Image (cartoon, rainbow, N blue to C red):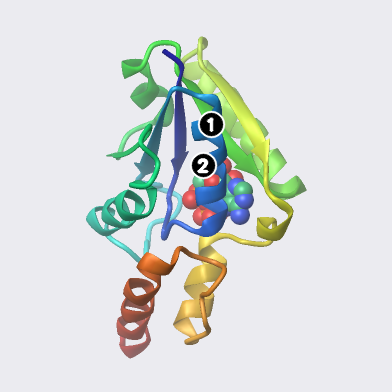
Amino acid sequence: MSIAICPGSFDPITLGHLNIVRRTSRIFDEVVVCIMHNAMKPNPMFTMEEKVEMARLVTRRYPNVRVDWSDGLLAEYVKQYPGAVIVKGLRAASDFEYEFQMNLINKKVNPELETMFLTSSEKYTFLSSSVVREMAFYGADLTGLVPEEIKDEIMEKAKHWRAK
Ligand code: ADP
């Protein structure tokens, strides 16, 4: 059985992420969306529980996709799925440099590990979680950026951030 791991911070999950997950689910038998605690992004907008819950809500329509989380190293996490492949989305040249570096580091920890990249769909190349957080912070409409089911939760959270 082929397994893909789609890792990321998903703070919050966007339509760009979902596009990659959906396309991955058509290629692999099983997809694990793994929400990673990223030590380099120390002030997330959402708690791990909230990120997991939102990701579960918007991926429930895909029967071969499930959501998990980890606060460890991705290369270690993946060891529990022998033969699994990491699948990531590539937006622009900046993603490429970062991902190239990450891939080398992952290979050092786990030499068997392979990473594959899907290029971003044209309409989502500009989209990132940080764009969503910023727009929500200023009260802008998130239609077309995040799944409808989680729009209100993001706006609600942004309201609390504004009040801080
Ligand atoms: P970000 O915080 O930059 O949105 P994450 O760390 O959550 O990203 O990203 C997880 C994965 O999803 C990465 O491989 C990233 O390149 C990919 N990704 C994020 N947004 C998009 C998008 N709009 N299109 C394609 N891939 C994306």
Q: What secondary structure is found at the residue carrying circle 1?
A: helix
Q: Quadrant of the N terminus?
A: top left
Residue under the point 68% across and 61% down: 126
As drawn, 71 above or below 85: below
Q: Which residue is mark 2?
A: 22
Q: Amino acid at mark 1?
A: Arg
* Furthest residue in direction bottom, as rendered: 163
The local crowd at label 1, few if under 14, some if 14 to 19, many if 20 or more residues have their Cα within 10 Å, is few
What's the amino acid at mark 2? Arg
Q: In the shown orientation, is residue 100 left or right of residue 41?
A: right
Circle on res. 151 = none
Can you give x and y, in whole percent of width and height, for residue 30 in the image? 40, 26
Q: How many marks do you count on the picture?
A: 2
Q: Residue 36 or 139: which is nearer the viewer?
A: 139
Q: Residue at x 44, y 22 (%)?
A: 29
In percent of width and height, residue 155 lies at 38, 79
Whole-number angstrom distance, CA of label 2 to CA of label 1: 7 Å
In the rendered view of the protein, which quadrant contains the C terminus? bottom left
Q: Are marks 2 and 1 in contact (CB under 8 Å)?
A: yes
Name the secondary structure under disc 2: helix
**In the visual, does 123 lie left or right of 10?**
right
* Residue 89 sits above or below residue 73 on the image: below
Q: Position of residue 44 (x, y in %)?
A: 37, 61
Where is residue 95? Give x, y as percent: 67, 45
Please tell me whether residue 128 is drawn above or below residue 90 in the rendered image: below
Instruction: Determine whether, in the image, residue 8 is placed left or right of residue 102.
Output: left
Mark 1 sits on what residue? Answer: 26
